[in-house]
Image (cartoon, rainbow, N blue to C red):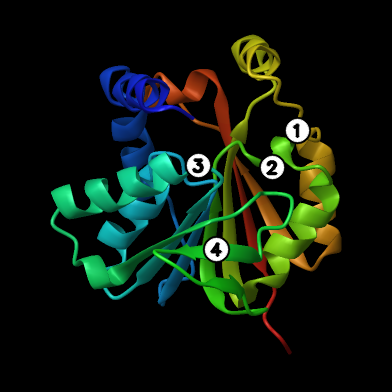
Amino acid sequence: MNFNLYNSYSWAMNFLGFDRQINRFVDELSLEHQDVQRVLDVGCGTGAMGVQLLVRFPDATLLATDIQERFLQGVLSNSETRGLRQDRVSVGLSDITKPAEVELLPGGVTSLEMESFDLISVGAVIGYSEDQRETIKALLSLIKPGGLLLNLEMNEHMVGRWTSHRYEYDALPLTEMAALMAEEGCSVSRLPLSMKYFPVNMTRVGLLAAKKRLS
């Protein structure tokens, strides 16, 4: 993504109120799992969800990943602007097809450990994977028992379908995505967004997968 396109995207997210309403959604979300120490924001974009999760959980650290380095620099800038300690934030390049493989910035390649994160957030990026089912399984394998996967996915209403078509985004049907998460040992909740989250509610719906604890 070139510099001008990145700036246009970032400006639009702020001007249209997406970032502000995503922050509100994260703040008001009922999360049973309160002991959040490690957060992974996959396909982070401007970092709205990941950075807000750091605000909500002041003892947590964040690893934000994206395929575009410009977005990663934006996450660092956003977190600094919001007064968050920079030692709580790390960033790395990663393709959603293989979310566990990360090229950390400023240097170093790593493979993320299984069951090493308390909470993983994704926002309408799974549909860009070359194998969405394997990506979902990989994301869930990175979560500790009792941890959460928060997916702010494209909804299936008219505007959501149009936006998905416009950006060549072809995610699994929501029922199929939720069923796969359940098969992988999660309890899954669908989180419709009301009008108070406008304009995010026009295109997004939440899926919250809670990974069952070991008995």
Residue at x 41%, y 41% (from the top left corner): 71
Instruction: Please name which of the two marks, 3 or 2, marks the residue nearer to the observer.
Output: 3
Q: Is residue 170 visible?
A: yes
Whether residue 36 can be seen here: no
Q: Disc 2 or disc 4, which is closer to the eye?
A: 4
Does label 3 or label 4 sit earlier along the sequence? 3
x then y, percent, for residue 27: 33, 49
Identify the residue at image location x=28%, y=25%: 14
Mark 3 is on which residue type?
Answer: Gln
Instruction: Measuring from the top left, give residue 4's x and y in whole percent.
Output: 36, 21
Q: Dividing the image into 4 quarters, which one contains the C terminus?
A: bottom right
Q: What distance separates the C-alpha of mark 3 from that of mark 1?
A: 20 Å
**Mark drawn on residue 103:** 4
Please state the horizontal and vertical placement of residue 148, each as a whole percent of the image: 57, 64
Residue at coordinates 69% horizontally, 15% vertically from top-left?
161
Q: CA distance from mark 2 to mark 1?
A: 6 Å
Which mark, by number, is residue 76?
none
Instruction: Using residue 157 as the reference point, say whether residue 135 is left or right of it.
Output: right
Find residue 189 and report its horizontal and vertical position in percent.
65, 49
The residue that mark 3 highlights is 68
> Residue extending furthest bottom?
215
The residues tagged by marks 3 and 2 sit, at their Cα atoms, a distance apart of 15 Å
Q: Residues within 10 Å of mark 4 (few under 14, many from 20)?
A: some
